[in-house]
Image (cartoon, rainbow, N blue to C red):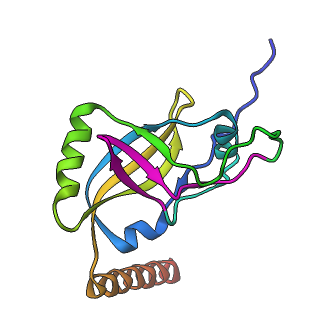
Amino acid sequence: MAKKSAKSAPPEIVNRRATYEYHFVQEYVAGIALTGTEVKSLRAGNANLTDAYCLFENGELWIRNLHIAEYDFGSDRNHDPRRLRKLLLRKSELRKLERRVREKGFTIIPVKIAFNERGLAKVHIALAIGKKAHDKREALKQREEKRELERLKKAYK
């Protein structure tokens, strides 16, 4: 019998800056409408979530400024790297999110893009509130203390 080759899982694209800039109130997992070359480029890990954000237009949730690099082996039908992409959620979730976003200070931020076990691209989004400067300093201080504890643990082992 021939063995199946172990496929490596596609990489997760993570917005590391989001955890530094925002407090997450609630998280959702949404589908995303993509073209073929966009999926191939995502599987190669060629995407950037840093400047991306979500907005509502006509009751639909769209993601803007998500950069998915053009697919290297694509033809003249390659996709536009920064086009608007529709996020797919249930109507009840969309209504809840739209209500919360209308409140002052709330925004929707994409946190991570990953592939599920069926091979579909999913965007992890979070309803978030922006951090103040003192909150960011506190987060840096906690991260530094955590690193120092890890160094001390390694030194005593």
Q: Position of residue 37 (x, y in %)?
A: 70, 38
27 vs 58, nearest the viewer: 58
The residue depicted at 24 percent of the width and 38 percent of the height is 93
Q: Position of residue 112 (x, y in %)?
A: 47, 52
Q: Is residue 87 magenta?
A: no
In this view, 8 is above or below 20: above
127 displayed left or right of 11: left
104 displayed left or right of 156: left
Q: Is residue 66 magenta?
A: yes
Query: Magenta part of the protein: which range?
Result: 52-71
Which residue, as the protein is rendered here, is positioned at the far top? 1
The residue depicted at 68 percent of the width and 44 percent of the height is 79
The residue depicted at 23 percent of the width and 47 percent of the height is 97
Our reading of the magenta stretch's main secondary structure is strand
Q: Position of residue 71 (x, y in %)?
A: 75, 46
118 vs 103, nearest the viewer: 103
13 vs 57, nearest the viewer: 57
The residue depicted at 59 percent of the width and 54 percent of the height is 82
Which residue, as the protein is rendered here, is positioned at the far front? 58
Quarter of the image for the N terminus: give it: top right
Q: Position of residue 122 (x, y in %)?
A: 47, 40
In this view, 39 is above or below 27: above
156 displayed left or right of 22: right
Q: Count the labels in the image.
A: 0
In this view, 96 is above or below 66: above
In this view, 67 is above or below 43: below
Residue 110 sits in quarter? bottom left
